Image (cartoon, helix red, strand yellow):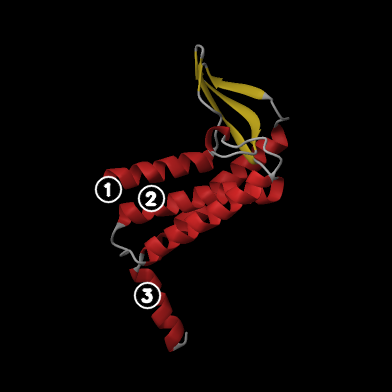
Amino acid sequence: MSEAEYLISQRINSTGLRWLWLVVVVLILDCSSKQWVISHFVLGQSEPLMPWCSLYYARNDGAAFSLLAGHNGWQRWFFVGVTIVIVLELLMLMYHSSAKKKLINIAHAFMIGGALGNLFDRIWYGFVVDFIDFSIGNWHYPTFNLADSFICIGVSMLLLCS
């Protein structure tokens, strides 16, 4: 390893970027779960897991809670752009954060991994694959995926840290 490579490695290990391996874990979990749903379900198919939770294959061409869904496709590239800006900002925050700030860096990694998981769906499919469906009686929560879950966990962790 050259001296320059060693110095870069030392710098990365001392920053929040040391936690980027979690982004890969989140991406693997998210992408593999979505691929499993695509290969084992037809669109709209539901399989109950518990009385209040089902696997339900849905597609979302909007954002959270189907925001801007069904708007002739322009929203796809809008959300791709917004996601790229957010991921770059989170990476900068990790770079400027100490590796010792574990919870903050884990939160950022969860958010980046979730954002990238949904970004990949938007780019490849033109929609986000959703499959976790909660309902109790007449109440129904919007269908979501593991990427959404990791983003929410990351945001919650940041709120707890502040």
Mark 3 belongs to which amino acid? Arg
Q: Going 56% across and 36% down the picture, which residue do you hit?
A: 67
Measuring from the top left, give residue 135's x and y in whole percent: 51, 19
Labels 3, 1: front one: 1
CA–CA distance between discs 3 and 1?
24 Å
Is 136 drawn above or below residue 145 in the view shown?
A: above
**Kind of element beneath mark 1:** helix
Of the residues under marks 1 and 2, which one precedes in the sequence? 2
**Kind of element beneath mark 3:** helix
Residue pointed to by mark 3? 11
Residue pointed to by mark 1? 161
Mark 1 belongs to which amino acid? Cys
Question: Are the residues flagged by discs 1 and 2 in contact, CB closer than 8 Å?
Answer: yes
Is 16 drawn above or below residue 158 in the view shown?
A: below
Measuring from the top left, give residue 1's x and y in whole percent: 47, 84
Mark 2 belongs to which amino acid? Ala
Measuring from the top left, give residue 11's x and y in whole percent: 37, 75
**Kind of element beneath mark 2:** helix
Q: Going 33% across and 47% down the picture, which residue do you hit?
A: 158
Of the residues under marks 3 and 1, which one precedes in the sequence? 3
Residue pointed to by mark 2? 107
Camera sees residue 75: yes
Q: Which of the pair 98/162 is nearer the observer?
A: 162
Q: Which of the pair 117/84 is nearer the observer?
A: 84
Which residue lies most toward the top here?
137
CA–CA distance between discs 1 and 2?
10 Å
